[in-house]
Amino acid sequence: MDRTPDPAFDRRIESLTVNLLECYEELDLIYRLSRGLMSTLDAQQSAALVLSEAIEIFDADMGWLVPGEAGPPAFADLVRDADPVVVERLQRSLVKELIGQGKSRTVYSVPQELGLEGEGLPDSLLCAVVKTENAVYGALCVGRRGPGRFFTARDLKLADVLASQAAIAIENSLLHRKRLEEEQRLIRIEEEMRLARDIQSNLLPRTAPAAAGYDIAGRGIPAQSVGGDYYDFIPIDGDRLALCLADVCGHGLPAALLMANLQATIRSQALAAASPAECMRRSNRLLFRSTAAGQFATCFYGVLELPTGRLVYSNAGHDHPLVFPAQGEDAALDRGGLILGVREEPGYEESALGLAPGDVLVLYSDGVTECLDGEDRDFGVEGLKAAVARARHGSAAQILDEILNAALAHAQGRPALDDMTLVVVRRL
């Protein structure tokens, strides 16, 4: 067997061995880096780890990792063993341009290729852009001093791997930060909704008033967790009871606060024994002066004289309540004026009618009549009238239930687009 040395074969074996060692080093670096980056979701820590590994793997004399120009930086500048003035010179001469182009580069001779000289400058420079498919986050740079200490094409390829790992870690950190901010925003919204629910629950009547000779019921179903409808029963004295149903614009905490403002305003006017028209006029003025543009409310307000059944009312742009007499045709209560909060002094009218025994008064919000079915047809006033006709000899609560059940049946399971609120008054 011929054992004569073959120099060419030996060189090939040596080359393969070197390549295998280089591949092992690269895999080991990627493994170490991946483990380190998985242990943190902080962009600054991730960037510091990548820079430290880069200086070690490339046997560099200096290094820095800086964010890009566009948008708020994901991390602060990181500089190791380099003069910040030198880093700034290289930034202006090369690195900012590379970040803008999204390209990495090896500079074999900084004085010759970039025309820069001076103390502290590296002789050879390697710059890899930190980027993903979605964004460019900055640049990773390492430098060497001394003649013949050039960076190779393999070094540039490995630097791109490091920069890619850094970019992925930074992007994950930003996504994590965004998720935390979103969670905090949802917590704030939920807290706001809880406050709004508390405000609203304290505003709406807990029970219907006990008025001799009358059967009264009221209920509201918000389209969201907090609605914009408001109804109230306000005893003025032993013989008079104020009835109110309003629909404030919007939902959530702003609507609840506007509702609280409206309730306080109307109650103060009711207890001051203002007439319905005067109550609407004063309430409108106060709302106009105390709320922002675009905040308004529709409102029906009436005062029922219990011994006689006389109802004096004013309607500020609200859906017309209906009176269903025991004998004769139903009637709409439409006298009043403009919705509250739009103009400072629009003027309001009032009117009066008598509720006889057996008559039924229905106050409602537009969420009831505008309830839509699968073909976008609304429940309408006619649907409400038909429901009252079916249950008019029942109690006020039974009439109210029949209207709501009919409206919900009409919707065929579709979610309500607006709050549904009803007040039913039946004179016994």
Image (cartoon, grey):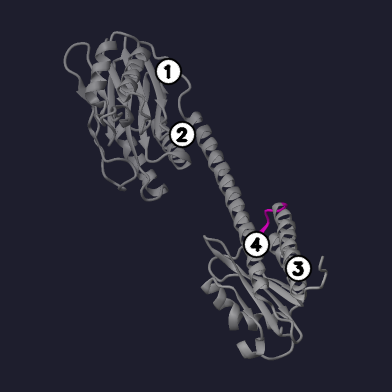
Looking at the rendered image, the quarter that the C terminus falls into is: top left
In this rendering, which labeled residue sits more in front, label 1 or label 2? 2
Q: Residues within 10 Å of mark 1 (few under 14, many from 20)?
A: some
Dot 3: element? helix
Q: Which residue is mark 2?
A: 226
Q: Name the kind of residue labelled 3 in the image.
A: Ile
**Residue 186 placed where, x, y %?**
55, 43
Query: 366 above or below 397?
Result: below
Disc 2 crowd, CA 10 A, few/some/many (<14, 14-19, 20+): many
Question: Up-down: is 73 above or below 403?
Answer: below
Q: Is residue 394 visible?
A: yes
Instruction: Determine whether label 3 and label 4 are within 8 Å by CB.
Output: no
- Location of mark 3 (residue): 13
User: Residue 336, percent across and down?
Assistant: 25, 35
Q: Pointer 3 and pointer 1: residues touching (CB < 8 Å)?
A: no
Label 3: few (<14), some (14–19) or many (≥20) C-alpha neighbours in 10 Å: few
Which residue has dot 1 on it?
A: 209
Between the residue at mark 2 and the residue at mark 4, the CA separation in whole angstroms equals: 45 Å
**Distance from the alpha carbon under mark 3 to that under mark 1:** 100 Å
**Disc 4 residue type?**
Ala
The answer to whether residue 412 is above or below residue 98 is above
State which mark lies toward you, 3 or 2: 3
Question: Of callouts 2 and 4, which one flags the residue occurring earlier in the amino acid sequence?
Answer: 4
Q: Of marks 1 and 4, which one's residue comes earlier in the chain? A: 4
Start-end of magenta stretch: 39-43
